[in-house]
Image (cartoon, grey):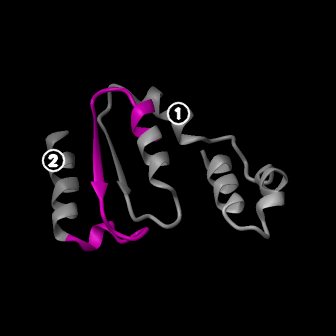
Amino acid sequence: GFRKIAREKLGGFWLTWPLQIPLSWTIPDDYEGVDHIPRISPVQVMVIHSVRDGIIPFHHGEALFEAAQEPKEFLQTDTPHGATFVIPGYRREVLRFMNAGR
C-alpha cells in the first residue's frame, strides 16, 4: 500500500532513513488497493506496472496482481513511471483487454 511505498522510499536515503516510520504515519491507509482489489471480482482486472518505475517499486504491482481474483491479467512494461502509454504496443494491449470485456 501507499504507506509501505513511503517507508521504502524514505528508507532508501540515509538522511530520511530514521524518519521512515514516523513520516509514513502521515500517509492515510484508508484506501489500500491491495486490500480492496479482491472485492472487484468477477469484473476483469488488468494490472499494469513497469520494471523501470522509479516511483513505485515493481513488487507492489506484483502484490496487487496476486491479491486480485480472476479474471485478471498482468501487463509488465519497460518504461519510466507514467510513460507506458507512449508505446503503441502497450496501448494496443490495453485496448485489446478492454475490448475483450465487452
Return the residue nearer the eye: 80 or 94. Answer: 80
Across and down, in percent, residue 81 comes to 43, 68
Q: Which part of the image, by quadrant, shows the C terminus?
A: top left
Res. 102 visible in picture? no
Q: Where is residue 49? Give x, y as percent.
A: 38, 54
Looking at the picture, which amino acid does disc 1 mark? Answer: His
> Quick one: quadrant of the N terminus?
top right
Q: Earlier in the sequence, mark 1 or mark 2?
A: 1
Q: Is residue 89 above or below residue 28?
A: below
Q: Amino acid at mark 2?
A: Asn
> Which quarter of the picture shows residue 71?
top left
The kind of secondary structure element at disc 1 is helix
Structural distance between the alpha carbons of marks 1 and 2: 24 Å
**Residue at the spot x=78%, y=66% of the render?**
16
Lateral position of residue 78 relative to residue 91, left or right:
right
Residue at image position (62%, 42%) is 31
Mark 2 element type: helix
Q: Is 1 located above or below residue 55 in the figure?
A: above
Q: Is residue 94 visible?
A: yes
Q: Residue 83 lies in magenta, yes or no?
A: yes
Corner quadrant of residue 12:
bottom right
- Say left or right for 88 vs 41: left
The residue beneath circle 2 is 99
* Pointers 1 and 2 in contact (C-beta within 8 Å): no
Tag 1 residue: 36
Residue nearest the viewer, comparing 29 with 23: 23
User: Could you tell me residue 28's position as x and y percent?
Assistant: 73, 48
